[in-house]
């Protein structure tokens, strides 16, 4: 079994550490993306605000909240 971690902090999703094909939460779409630390930045659904906009949780599977998107993601 792959090691997993919680991105949203709510224990709702289990993201696979180091798996570029992680399918949990928002990872089924454009995530995970490369982090500058060499880890992967995973994403989970957040919530809607009163105007209908929503945000997503993002966390690196190596450096956690200190993630920084690597340039490689966009060539
Ligand atoms: Zn993931
Ligand atoms: Zn990182």
Image (cartoon, rainbow, N blue to C red):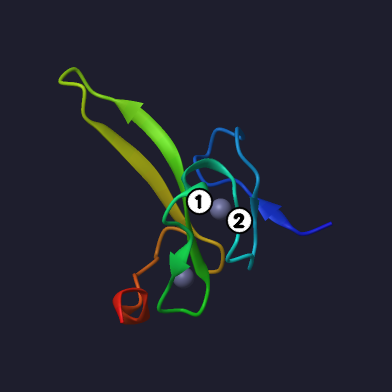
Q: Position of residue 13 (x, y in %)?
A: 61, 39
Q: Is residue 37 left or right of residue 47?
A: right
Label 2 SS? loop
Tell me the number on the disc at residue 22: 2
Q: Is residue 21 left or right of residue 36?
A: right
Numbered label tally: 2
What residue appears at the point 46 percent right and 55 percent down from the top-left corner?
59
Q: CA distance from mark 2 to mark 1?
A: 6 Å
What residue appears at the point 49 percent right and 40 percent down from the top-left corner?
8
Label 1 SS? helix
Instruction: Give the class, few, some or many, for how many residues have Cα within 10 Å of label 1's Cα (few <14, many ≥20).
Output: many
Could you tell me if the residues under marks 2 and 1 are in contact, i.e. CB atoms within 8 Å? yes
Q: Quadrant of the N terminus?
A: bottom right
Which residue extends farthest top?
Answer: 50
Instruction: Give the class, few, some or many, for how many residues have Cα within 10 Å of label 2's Cα (few <14, many ≥20).
Output: many
Ligand 1 within 8 Å of the CB at mark 2: yes
Mark 1 lies on residue: 27
Tell me the number on the disc at residue 15: none
Q: Quadrant of the C terminus?
A: bottom left
Which residue extends farthest right?
Answer: 1
What residue appears at the point 30 percent right and 38 percent down from the top-left corner?
55
Vertical order, 53 against 57 (above or below)? above
Q: Position of residue 9 (x, y in %)?
A: 52, 39
Ligand 1 within 8 Å of the CB at mark 1: yes
Q: Position of residue 67 (x, y in %)?
A: 39, 66
Vertical order, 50 against 29 (above or below)? above
Q: Quadrant of residue 14?
A: top right
């Amino acid at each position: 079994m792959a090691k997993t971690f919680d991105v949203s902090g709510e224990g709702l999703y289990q993201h696979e550490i180091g798996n570029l094909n992680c399918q949990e939460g928002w990872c089924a779409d454009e995530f995970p993306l490369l982090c500058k630390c060499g880890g992967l930045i995973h994403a989970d659904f957040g919530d809607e605000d009163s105007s209908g906009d929503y945000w997503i949780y993002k966390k690196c599977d190596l450096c956690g909240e200190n993630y920084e998107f690597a340039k490689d993601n966009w060539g």
